[in-house]
Image: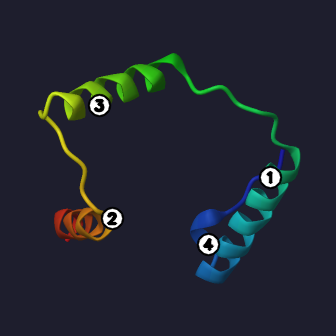
Amino acid sequence: MTTLAIDKMTVAEKLWAMEQLWDDFCRQAEPMQSPDWHRDVLLIREEQVKYGTSSFLDWSEAKKRIQDHTS
């Protein structure tokens, strides 16, 4: 197993490593099943939207809220 000194890598090196990992994953990954809890969460959220207790945001508003929350 190879260990990377991520804390010592430059941003460019980290991006290169991520690209290599992603490319390898895309070539070799076996199909994955979503976990049962994921289905359960989606069903709950679907019901919340159906009954008006939750709603959707457009992507630009969602990004703004995330940025405001992390600032």
Nearest the eye: 14 or 62: 62
Q: Which badge, 3 or 1, is on the more N-terminal residue?
A: 1
Foreground mark, 2 or 1, reads 2
* Neighbours of disc 3 within 10 Å: few (<14), some (14-19), many (20+): some
The amino acid beneath tag 1 is Cys
Tell me the CA gap for discs 2 and 4.
34 Å
* Mark 1 residue element: helix
Q: Which residue is mark 2?
A: 59
> Which of the labelled discs sits on residue 45, or is there none?
3
The reply to whether discs 2 and 4 touch (Cβ–Cβ < 8 Å) is no
* Neighbours of disc 2 within 10 Å: few (<14), some (14-19), many (20+): few
Quarter of the figure with residue 55: top left
Foreground mark, 2 or 4, reads 2
* Mark 3 residue element: helix
Residue under the point 26% across and 25% down: 47
Could you say where residue 48 lies in the image, as x and y percent from the top left?
21, 29
- Residue lying furthest front: 50
Q: Which badge, 1 or 4, is on the more N-terminal residue?
A: 4
Q: Is residue 54 above or below residue 15?
A: above
Q: Which residue is mark 1?
A: 26
Q: Which residue is mark 4?
A: 8
Q: Is residue 67 above or below residue 44?
A: below
Quadrant position of the C terminus in the picture = bottom left
